[in-house]
Image (cartoon, helix red, strand yellow):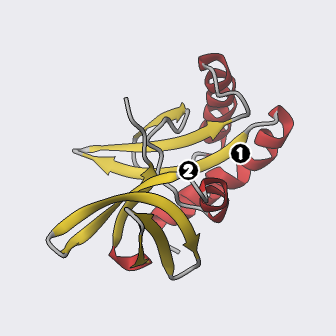
Amino acid sequence: MTKKETYEWKTESFLLPLMEEHKFELVDVEYVKEASTWYLRAYIDKEGGISVDDCEVISRRLGEWLDKEDFIEESYILEVSSPGLGRPLKKEKDFIRSIGKDVEVRLYKARDKRKEFTGVLKAFDKDTVTIEEDGNEILFNRPEIALIRLAFDF
């Protein structure tokens, strides 16, 4: 397990019982470097949406635990937030919840001179994702997908 995976796993392990206690859902935990700064991010949600106060409660508890445990070597910024409208589908539960909904798929490499596809999520498994775009089913292999998220119109 990489250092990044270890940090995410330990953080997720602490957060899961806390999520149950507050009836929240842990959407994702990520430890990423952007520019020269490391971020430890926890994305949380609940029925009806997450509030700033909800994020603050979790952030305080998580921050206190991280200070006590002190297992992350680098300095980092802790963020606890809602996953937002454009949240990526990562876990099986995200895909299950999104079956029948419009999704946006972005590829690493162009297929038929396109990198972006939008359609209804029809099926998925551990290796593939299928959408229906303009009446045509398109099968994507997971390794070719850079991002898949719910599509939304403003």
Q: Nearer the viewer, residue 87 or 131?
A: 131
Residue type marked 1: Leu
Name the residue at 75% across, 49% down.
16
Residue 4 left/right relative to 10 = left
Vertical order, 50 against 33 (above or below): above
- Badge 1 element: helix
Extreme left residue here? 113
Q: Residue 47: x and y, percent?
A: 73, 33
Q: Quadrant of residue 38?
A: top left
**Could you say which disc has been placed on residue 15 in the image?**
1
131 above or below 15?
A: below
Q: Gap between marks 1 and 2, in whole Å?
A: 9 Å
Where is residue 71? Give x, y as percent. 56, 52
Element under disc 2: strand
- What residue did someone put label 2 on? 29
User: Can you tell which quarter of the image residue 67 is in?
Assistant: top right
Binning the other alpha carbons within 10 Å of mark 2 as few (below 14), some (14 to 19) or many (20 upward) gives: many
Whether residue 73 is visible here, answered yes or no, is no
Visible in this render: residue 38? yes
Q: Nearer the viewer, residue 39 or 26?
A: 26
Instruction: Give how far across and how far down residue 144 sits, in percent.
Output: 33, 76
Residue furthest front as drawn: 135
Numbered tag placed on residue 138 in the rendering: none
Quarter of the image with the C terminus is top left
Is 110 positioned to the left or the right of 29 in the image? left
Tag 2: residue type?
Val
Tell me if label 1 and label 2 are in contact, CB under 8 Å: yes
Which residue is pictured at 41% across the width and 40% down the height?
76
Q: Residue at x 48, y 51 (%)?
A: 102
Which badge, 1 or 2, comes first in the chain's sequence? Answer: 1
Give the image location of residue 15, x and y in percent. Answer: 71, 45
For disc 1, the neighbor class at 10 Å (few under 14, some 14 to 19, many from 20) is: many
